[in-house]
Amino acid sequence: MRIRVKPAGIIRRYVEEMDMEVPAGFTIRGLIALLAIPAELKLMVFVNGQRKDADEILEDGNEVRLITLLSGG
C-alpha cells in the first residue's frame, strides 16, 4: 500500500517528504523505525490530520505528518 510521509521542522534533516510503499498492517512505530528517525526526537504523528499513537495501523492513501515536540526552559 502507498502512503505519503510529510516531515516538519527538524525532522526534515533526517527524512524528505515522499510517497512510499509499505506492507499491509504496517504501524506508525514501524514507519518511524524504517525511516531511522533518532529515538531522542520526541514525535507527534498525525494521520490525515488526526493525532495518532505509534501502534496505529496505517492504511492505503494515508498522509502521515511527523512533527517534533519542543522543550526548553
Image (cartoon, rainbow, N blue to C red):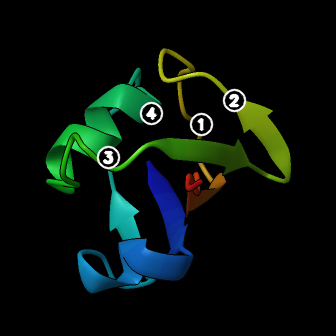
Which of the pair 49/44 is nearer the observer? 44
Seen at 80% across and 52% down, the residue is 48
Which residue lies under the disc numbered 1?
A: 59
Q: Residues within 10 Å of mark 3 (few under 14, many from 20)?
A: some
Q: Secondary structure at mark 3?
A: loop
- Residue 47 is marked as none
Residue 25 % position (x, y): 41, 20
Name the amino acid type tagged 1.
Answer: Glu
- Residue 28 is marked as 4
Indicate whether 27 appears above or below 44: above
Which residue lies under the disc numbered 3?
A: 22
Q: Residues within 10 Å of mark 2 (few under 14, many from 20)?
A: some
Q: Secondary structure at mark 4?
A: helix
Name the amino acid type tagged 4.
Answer: Ile
Which residue lies under the disc numbered 2?
A: 52
Mark earlier in primary sequence (4, 3)? 3
- Among the 4 quarters of the image, the one containing residue 73: bottom right
Mark earlier in primary sequence (2, 3)? 3
| Callout 2–callout 4 Cβ contact below 8 Å | yes
Query: Depth-wise, is mark 4 or mark 3 nearer the camera?
Result: 4
Mark earlier in primary sequence (3, 1)? 3
Residue 68 % position (x, y): 53, 58
